[in-house]
Image (cartoon, rainbow, N blue to C red):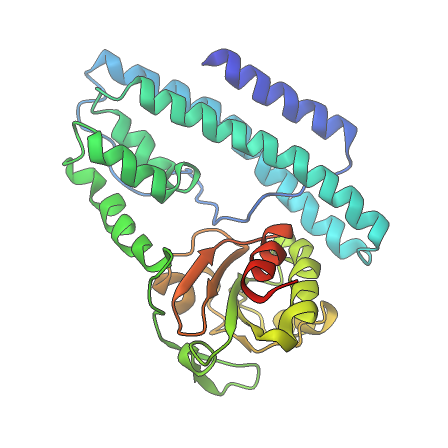
Amino acid sequence: MRKILFLIMSSLALCISAQTSIPALRIIPNNSNGSSGSTPSANTATNPEGNFVQAVIDSVENSMNLIRQKSDELMEYVRAQELTPERRAVADSMAEAYRAIYDNIIIYLRQEVESHRESSDVARLLNRYQRLLGLDYLEEYLSTYPHADQPELADIRSQIAINQHIKPGAQLIDFELPDEVGASHHLSEYIGKGHYVLVDFWASWCGPCRQEMPNVKAAYERFHERGFDILGLSFDNNREAWLRAVADLGMTWPQLSDLKGWKSLAAQKYNVRAIPFTLLFDPEGKVVADNLRGEALSQKLEELLGN
């Protein structure tokens, strides 16, 4: 496993030296201790088996700290000047390299929890790295994990239950948010009205969101007349920055935000812990797919609405 980590770190170092910046895959809230706030397993300190946990944490955190640094650099990069086709091509190339590194971190982490499946101390890693492991993976893992009934895994079990709301076929969760002028609107005013609707969770301060927006805009311009709409739900907390980004990025579709950042009602209702994040709803208001980005969005719309 240490060999895998060495390859991850080496790849990251090469990418950093070869590029001026590396865009982050998604922006996640950065807790200072990197944990989910859960109490570590009580027997970790006395059980030698628990020693592997800290080694894994150290390895993952070293990589993730570099990723967070590159996320900040991306924000500066996309704000420095207009994303021309040439600059966008460079950014896309950098993103591909970054995603490979990010995926390798996830592979490393999953291999570690699989190889220590019999240990109750794995619960610390499951809690700490919920976002990296993914709720679908965690749901499958806990179904056969012999220590799944530990109290400290209660939060994960709760998140898995909430995650059912974003799976294909799930019905819209309706709630209210204000628009750009402060008027409140239900999501159901836009969704379930006979069109396919992409709900785009984003923020003006999110570099990956801004980088992805040209793809979203292109899909809107291509498919809007055939029954495709977009609803933006912003995690901004500054009205001026939010509205300026809407104008600068050419987002002509409806926008809602309670300007509460990560504490937004939208984040709570859909358990959004990383952005950009999207949900595609069908004409009846049921989830079709989640987290469609780049070409995947256009491909799905071609499948649903034709070329």
Q: Residue at x 79, y 42 (%)?
A: 90
Residue 168 is drawn in which quadrant?
Answer: bottom left
Q: Is residue 222 above or below residue 105?
A: below
Q: Nearer the viewer, residue 101 or 78?
A: 101
Residue 22 seen from this side? no
Q: Residue at x 27, y 44 (%)?
A: 156
Q: Residue at x 43, y 44 (%)?
A: 31
Judge from the rendering whether residue 119 lies leftward or rightward of residue 171; answer left or right.
left
Q: Nearer the viewer, residue 223 or 157?
A: 223
Residue 223 seen from this side? yes
Q: Nearer the viewer, residue 47 or 267?
A: 267
Judge from the rendering whether residue 242 lies leftward or rightward of residue 271; answer left or right.
right
Q: Nearer the viewer, residue 196 or 14?
A: 196
Residue 131 lies, in percent from the top left, at 41, 42
Q: Is residue 78 above or below residue 32?
A: below
- Name the quarter where the N terminus is drawn: top left
Judge from the rendering whether residue 282 lies leftward or rightward of residue 221; answer left or right.
left
Judge from the rendering whether residue 94 lies leftward or rightward of residue 27; answer left or right.
right
Q: Residue at x 72, y 50 (%)?
A: 76
Residue 237 lies, in percent from the top left, at 53, 68
* Outermost residue, front side: 306
- Name the quarter where the C terminus is drawn: bottom right
Residue 49 lies, in percent from the top left, at 25, 14
Q: Is residue 243 above or below residue 11?
A: below
